[in-house]
Amino acid sequence: MRAVLALLLLGLATSAQADFDAASYPPYERCALCHGLFGQSHLDKFPHLAGQKPAYIQAQLDAFLTGARTNDGGQMSAIVTELKAEDFAVVVAWFAEQDPPEPAAQPATSSGKELTEASGCLDCHSGDAAGAVPYLTAQHAGYLAKQMRDFLDGRRIHSEAAPVHQNLLADMEAGIEDIAAYLSSLERTP
């Protein structure tokens, strides 16, 4: 009886696989595996994309596609090659139009706020900034800290702003976690 049931289940699984058509799904669903369908990821390894600036999302997709930017496991470089050129605009619009993530809880200390204000992070990374400059607010603190360390250590070098970030962060290395926690606790307002 178990053998018959196993063969029946195998037949159903094989039939379902044969009927699956990945091209019939919107392209942003590939991105949703890590970033969440509505751009709010559950793991701080993957950034929230919801409510992010369209120009920034597009710039990052382009950088991963050309190899100017990489990530630790190379997933992004592989995923962007699965998208067609016309898919990029669909992906960018989908995530940029989603409601921004909720901010994290306020940190226990004010050192992150003080360091952020002293460094002027939000002078560039605010709703007023034009172009491909990302919002940092309401982002995962772990993701922000990792990216700051990557800039500091020279692992993230794909933009003209990389040297600026590297120099700025050199003076604040001990406070990176505090800055990240503070930025994650702020509401993202376009």
Image (cartoon, grey):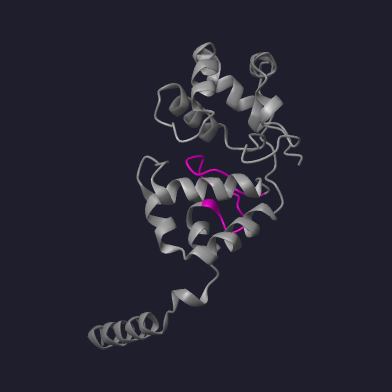
Identity of the residue drawn at 60% across and 22% down:
179
- Report whether 150 appears left or right of 138: left
Is residue 45 covered in magenta?
Answer: yes
Identity of the residue drawn at 41% across and 41% down:
68
Identity of the residue drawn at 47% across and 66% down:
84
Q: Is residue 151 above or below residue 167?
A: below
**Considering depth in this image, is 94 or 89 the residue closer to the camera?**
89
**Considering depth in this image, is 131 or 148 the residue closer to the camera?**
131
Q: Residue furthest left?
A: 3
Where are the magenta residues, as a range?
Answer: 35-50
Q: Which corner quadrant holds the C terminus? A: top right
Q: Is residue 36 above or below residue 112?
A: below
Q: Position of residue 108 (x, y in %)?
A: 66, 20
Is residue 144 covered in magenta?
Answer: no
So how many labels did they put on this image? 0
Q: Position of residue 128 (x, y in %)?
A: 76, 35
**Considering depth in this image, is 170 or 114 the residue closer to the camera?**
170
Q: Position of residue 182 (x, y in %)?
A: 65, 25
